[in-house]
Image (cartoon, rainbow, N blue to C red):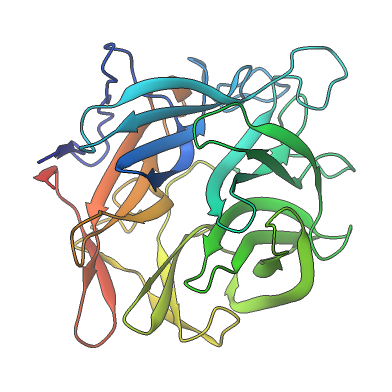
Amino acid sequence: MAKIINGEIGQFVPWYDTDGNEINVSDGGIIYVDGVYHWYGMQLRDLPARGGGQGGQTTLTGVAMYASTDLEHWRYEGIILSCVNEPGHELCGPMRFERPKIIYNAKTKKFVLWYHYVGYPGDHGFTEGTAEAGVAVCDTVNGAYQWQGHCRPIDEKGLVRDNTVYQDRDGSAYYIYDRQVGDDRCLHIVKLSEDYLSFTKEYRRLDVAFWREAAAVVYRNGYYYMITSDLTSWAFNQAKYFRAKALFGPWEDMGDPCVGDEDQKTFHSQTTFIFKVEGRDDLYIHMAERHNTESFLHCSYIWLPIDFHDDDTLSLTYQKEWTI
Ligand code: GAL
């Protein structure tokens, strides 16, 4: 039984690892392997949000991982995808491995990590080499991931902003991202190759998800659900979710999933990932982050169970604390 403490809306509640250090895994996800949950994300710095590579929203170290069998006690496993701090190197910090997501490829027996690559100095850019999709690969879930490079899905025109990855029940996998071409920003879904290391030519623009980001997808009972945020940088905003019978759509706009959310700011958080609690029929956790723009080391994690309803809708209700 794990106790989840989200705190008051607006409060930053630190979560600690088994060494007593604050857990620091920004905008990542969870992958369950052989009885162990692995929680990973970008390791941020004790600094406010600032440009010029000086901000806490960038990393000098890379993507960190923690492990737990009960979702409450998290052991630090170290950096799994490391910055290379040699000037001029593509992984030289400060940079961003934003919104990293890991999936396992059963055919190649590799763990594949995709992320939104923001090269040095880690401020969102528009030029080649920034705003791309990056990929790394490893034989074990918590080993040293080997960087495989970065590129833009679909074509070079479309900058990559927030991304996620979704693995379907048939083993196919999809890269979902906020594609920016000038002022046009819209979520797109691109099918990955069989080894998950590159993009196929199959993709869809999800017109209904215009001007949305921070997507997370879950499948249940015949429907795919995608929870997203509005596009207001670090400022909290209203969530909205979509529903579809197939990943390539059509997707329906289902409105705000948050119930009793007085100022309509997703309980002061932004979606990061959805995962299923193993051994529980219907328990899916919506992971979100309360970004702390005064110090990114002290962001806090907001975990809520998703309520699914008989009419194939879903909702989120805030709980200051609850037990899994
Ligand atoms: C957020 C987005 C983050 C990051 C930030 C600004 O809205 O979800 O991933 O891009 O804006 O840098």
Q: Is residue 191 above or below residue 114?
A: below
Is residue 183 or residue 253 the one in the foreground? 253
Query: Could you tell me which residue is drawn at 39 percent across and 28 percent down?
Result: 66
Give the x, y percent position of residue 239.
Answer: 40, 62
Q: How many marks?
A: 0
Is residue 150 or residue 109 the one in the foreground? 109
Give the x, y percent position of residue 90.
Answer: 82, 27
Is residue 57 or residue 60 the one in the foreground? 60
Query: Could you tell me which residue is drawn at 62 percent across and 62 percent down?
Result: 176
In the rendered image, is residue 295 in sight?
Answer: no
Query: Could you tell me which residue is drawn at 28 percent across and 50 percent down?
Result: 267
> In screen coordinates, is 185 left or right of 70?
right
Where residue 286 sits, quadrant-wise, is: bottom left
Give the x, y percent position of residue 132.
Answer: 77, 47
Is residue 120 or residue 265 the one in the foreground? 120
Q: Is residue 154 above or below residue 305?
A: below
> In screen coordinates, is 9 left or right of 127?
left
Give the x, y percent position of residue 42.
Answer: 53, 31
In the rendered image, is residue 290 in sight?
Answer: yes
Where residue 249 sits, quadrant-wise, is: bottom right
Q: Is residue 253 above or below residue 25?
A: below
> In screen coordinates, is 56 left or right of 296?
right
Query: Could you tell me which residue is drawn at 28 percent across and 29 percent down?
Result: 12
Task: Find ligand 1 in the image and state its quadrant.
Answer: top right
Where residue 153 sits, quadrant-wise, is: bottom right
Quadrant occupied by the N terminus? top left
